[in-house]
Amino acid sequence: MPHGEWLPWIKKNCPFSRDSAAEYMAIAGLNVEHARNLSVRGCLKEVAAKKMREVEERERRNEPVSPRVKAWMDDIKQRQAHQKERDKHVDANNAKNAKEFEALKEVALEIVKAGYRELSKKHHPDVGGSTEEMRKLTAAKQRLVAIIAEEWAKAA
């Protein structure tokens, strides 16, 4: 396409902005096999990573890098550092929540077991209850324990 015709062509033929079109062009230039499996955002991260590697390579060869590009790279590195810090907090919160969630499971099981103990003291054959009542009580406890385990497995 001749110089200067790209923007008018984008405005006429594409349902998105010039910036979006530029992003899609950068994605198309990735030549990364797995790019088709990524979201647009994932592809743009790949584009940024590729550009950063290119700039770092230029710096290693002592080639000049514009101050604007250096500022862009510093901004990206700073954002990545902030994201890593946020991820640490999220991971810590997730671990804490998982422990609390597991503790709730244990509490639920203890409630079932305590109820079973209390009822078995009343309905055990040794204290005037029947064997049939104890079988029903034991079966009910086992069903409740299975339900709790199943529900926790679904939620986890």
Image (tube, grey):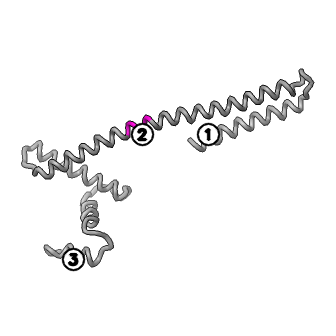
**Amino acid type, residue under disc 3 in the picture:** Pro
In this rendering, the label closer to the viewer, 3 or 2:
2
Which residue is at a point 57% across and 33% down the rendered structure image? 102
Asked if residue 29 is positioned above or below residue 4 in the image, the reply reads above
Q: Tell which circle, 3 or 1, labels the residue nearer the N-terminal end.
A: 3
Q: Tell which circle, 3 or 2, labels the residue nearer the N-terminal end.
A: 3
Which residue is at a point 75% across and 34% down the rendered structure image? 142
**Amino acid type, residue under disc 1 in the picture:** Trp
- Separation (CA) of disc 3 from disc 2: 45 Å
Q: Secondary structure at mark 1?
A: helix
Q: Secondary structure at mark 3?
A: helix
Residue indicated by mark 2: 90
Asked if residue 85 is positioned above or below residue 119 in the image, the reply reads below
Q: Nearer the viewer, residue 114 or 138?
A: 114
- Which stretch is magenta? 87-92
**Amino acid type, residue under disc 2 in the picture:** Val
Q: Secondary structure at mark 2?
A: helix
Percent coordinates x, y for residue 86 in the rendering: 36, 40
Label placed on residue 152: 1
Q: Tell which circle, 2 or 1, labels the residue nearer the N-terminal end.
A: 2
Residue 57 in which image quadrant = top left
Which residue is at a point 16% across and 48% down the rendered structure image? 71
Image quarter where the C terminus lies is: top right
Residue indicated by mark 3: 8
Q: Is residue 91 magenta?
A: yes
